[in-house]
Image: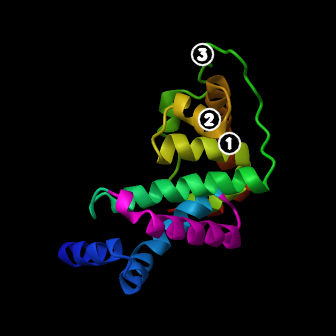
Amino acid sequence: MQKNFKHIFSLALKQDRLAQKSIYEIFSGRMLAVAKSYVNSREDAEDVLVTAFCKAFSRIGECSDEKSFPFWLRKIVVNDSITFIRKNKNILYYDAGNVEEIGNEILDEDENNFPNFDVENVLAKMPLGYKLVFNLYIFEDKKHQEIAGILNISEGTSKSQLNKAKKWLVEFFNQNENEKFIKK
C-alpha cells in the first residue's frame, strides 16, 4: 500500500485525474467524518469535503511528501469546516474577557471517567460553540492561543468554551436517556 500510494501521489502531483480519484476514494470516508464532526449536517459536510479536495488537488504541490499528505489534507478539511461554519452559522460565544486563568470545574480525574461513547452522534448534539473549541483542542491538539486565533475569540473565551463543553458532556452522560450513546 505504501509504495502504491507513493506512486499514486506522484501521479497526482502531475494533476493526473485517475490518481486524484484514487486519493479521493482512499481518504474521503475519513475526511467526511472529520468534516461532520464540525458541521452537523451530512450534506454540509459533503460540501466541505468537495471544497477541501478541490483545494487540496489544486495545491498538492505544497504538500511536502506522500507521508504527510493525510495530515495536510486533514488540516484543509478542518479549516474549510470552520470557514463554512463562519459563513453559514451564527456562533455565540460567551466572551470571558481578560481572564487570566479559568479554573477547571471538572477535575482531571473526572476526565478519565468519561465512558467509551459514539463520538460522532454525541458531538452532533453538542452546542456549536462548545464543539468547535472542543474539536480543535482535543482532536486537532491546538492550544488555546491557536484556537483563539482560528476562531477570532479571546484566549479566555476558548478556555471557557472548553470547560463548558466538558461540563456539557458530564451532564449529557448523567442523563439516563443518553445511555444509548455509550459503547458497551
Circle 2 is placed at which residue position?
162
Residue 11 at x, y = what percent?
30, 78
Q: Is residue 2 magenta?
A: no
**Marks 2 and 3, how far apart in space?**
13 Å
Circle 1 is placed at which residue position?
130
Q: Residue furthest front?
A: 14
State which tag comes first along the sequence, 3 or 1. 3
Q: Is residue 123 above or below residue 137?
A: below
**Marks 2 and 1, how far apart in space?**
6 Å
Q: Nearer the viewer, residue 120 or 167?
A: 120
Identify the residue at image location x=64%, y=41%: 170
Q: Is residue 125 left or right of residue 61?
A: right
State which tag comes first along the sequence, 2 or 1. 1
Identify the residue at image location x=37%, y=57%: 62
Q: Is residue 112 left or right of residue 67?
A: right
Q: Are marks 2 and 1 in contact (CB under 8 Å)?
A: yes
The mark found on residue 101 in the picture is: 3
Q: Is residue 56 magenta?
A: yes
Amino acid type, callout 1: Tyr
> Magenta span covers which residues?
39-63
- Visible residue check, residue 118: no
Tag 3: Cα neighbours inside 10 Å, few (<14), some, or many (≥20)? few
Q: Nearer the viewer, residue 174 or 88?
A: 88
Tag 2: Cα neighbours inside 10 Å, few (<14), some, or many (≥20)? many
Q: Is residue 90 above or below residue 52?
A: above
Amino acid type, callout 2: Leu
Which secondary structure lies at badge 1? helix
Residue 27 at x, y = what percent?
42, 72
Q: Exactly how many numbered labels are in the figure?
A: 3
Q: Is residue 12 left or right of residue 135?
A: left
